[in-house]
Amino acid sequence: MTDLAFSPAKRLARLIREKKIGCLELLEHYLARVARHDPKLNSIVATRPSAARKAARAADAALRKRGAKLGPLHGVPMTVKESFDVAGLPTTWGLAEFKHHRAKTHALAVERLLAAGANVFGKTNVPVMLADWQSFNPVYGTTNNPWDLTRGPGGSSGGSAAALAAGLTGLEYGSDIGASIRNPAHYCGVYGHKPTYQIVSPRGQHLGDAVSVADITAIGPLARSADDLEIALRATAGPDPIDGTGWKLALVSPKWNSARGLRVAVMLTHPTAEVDASVQAPIHALARFLAHKGARVSERARPRFDPDEAHKVYIQLLRFATSGRQPDEQYRRFEQQKNSIAADDYSYYAQFVRGTTMAPRDWARLNERRHQMRLAWADFFRDWDVLLCPTAATAAFAHMQTGERWERMLSVNGRPQPTTTQMFWAGYSGMCFLPSTVAPVGLTKQGLPVGVQIVGPQYGDLATIRFAQLIEREYCAFVPPPAFAS
């Protein structure tokens, strides 16, 4: 049964279809593990056991009914990030003032997962306003990393990755504007996919009454297998009901199934955001493996634009995209400060202030530069199938909950680096709407997971997931954190 808890969702669904385990039995198994293990993690912060048991019984009954149509996730228990609406459960985004808010309907992605047969039994922890690479807030408290409880699981889908890694849920769904899927996947040793911008509707993944879609942001799955990423993406991708009257999504599956002949660019570090040797080494080892298997590997190929400029553009577009969430008092303070910031100050805080308060004309200029870079990426992917790069500068770091994010420091190759600097690895591709899949590729000497970020062309989601499937099959797969493997 322990092995069952860490099984991919694809295998769980197969065992259910083959009647080797019942839907209710599997749900109870996960609920028991949550009760036993989650007090140490604090990853699953809201549950609906009665509704989930009712759904499991109905799924068991459907299985007994001859000719019943079963979805690809029939009976699989899963959780979703706290920011997604699930009817009857709180949606707070970690804000104390929303503590008593209860969603009245399901988010569209949740509806589609339910339609695929999944049994959504709970929600997982986030940082305040989904704005940290840690997951702690005044509503639910702190989530710990299952590989080392003194460290964070990442953010903002930190509870998602922690629950998956610890074997407390069968599948997860998160969101990503600044590596919020990719970063926790890397820190916790699971798989995550940030889709191409706008191919999965985020309707119902909003705070309060908001309905608009923010620039850059995407929603997508986290899992213990790359196969599960594809299943969950296929179940949720496509336009919402309004857009669906005018366009349909048609993702193309890649024709390759092995490394031989693949064109693989590798970027291990960059002066803008130096990466620790402990993270570079496993990615470099993967590159050597791929070359041995017949891939054409280059550590010099890059799209034709300055990565440092891309980082500056990204941070300001990001901060503009999230400016509507800023409290009025904080926004007024930024307005007062922006004129006192030197024109050549490109510290994170300076760009935060500029981006939050920029005029529409300034945004239009940055957006134009972004789209020029987007076209450069398209040219790059005519010659290369994927780009492999880090997700973050280090493996999971110790809890740091005091001071502003840009004031907190990581040790990168023995030198201090602000935690916000590593957002370079989120924005380099994400700002240009590209899909990225994170797959585990090894452990540091400290025994912490390292993931590789697999970047592909716009709408190349199935290619980046296929590459993760190749890594999983031939090189490195998910392993449970030792403290939770029983």
Image (tube, helix red, strand yellow):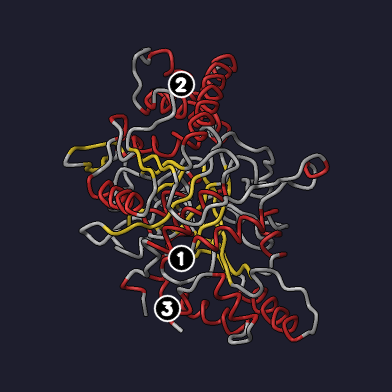
Q: Identify the residue under disc 1.
A: 163
Q: Identify the residue under disc 3.
A: 36
Residue type of the residue flagged with mark 2: Arg
Whether residue 396 is visible here, answered yes or no, is: no
Instruction: State which mark lies toward you, 1 or 3.
Output: 1
At horizontal 51% and vertical 77% (from top left) the residue drawn is 30
Q: Compared with residue 451, is residue 36 higher up or lower down, i.e. above or below? A: below
At horizontal 52% and vertical 20% (from top left) the residue drawn is 369
Residue type of the residue flagged with mark 1: Ala
**Image location of residue 297, percent across then percent down:** 36, 42
Q: Nearer the viewer, residue 152 or 267?
A: 267
Q: Compared with residue 112, is residue 268 higher up or lower down, i.e. above or below? A: above
Q: Are marks 1 and 3 in contact (CB under 8 Å)?
A: no
**Image location of residue 74, percent across then percent down:** 66, 73
Locate residue 169 relative to residue 312 in the image: left or right: right
Residue density around tag 3, few if under 14, some if 14–19, many if 20 or more, within 10 Å: few
Instruction: State which mark lies toward you, 2 or 1.
Output: 1
Comes first in the chain, label 3 or label 2: 3
Quadrant of the drawing holding the C terminus: bottom left
Residue density around tag 2, few if under 14, some if 14–19, many if 20 or more, within 10 Å: many
**Image location of residue 307, percent across then percent down:** 39, 27
Whether residue 204 is visible here, answered yes or no, is: yes
State the CA–CA distance, disc 3 to disc 2: 47 Å
Element class at badge 2: helix
State the CA–CA distance, disc 2 to disc 1: 37 Å
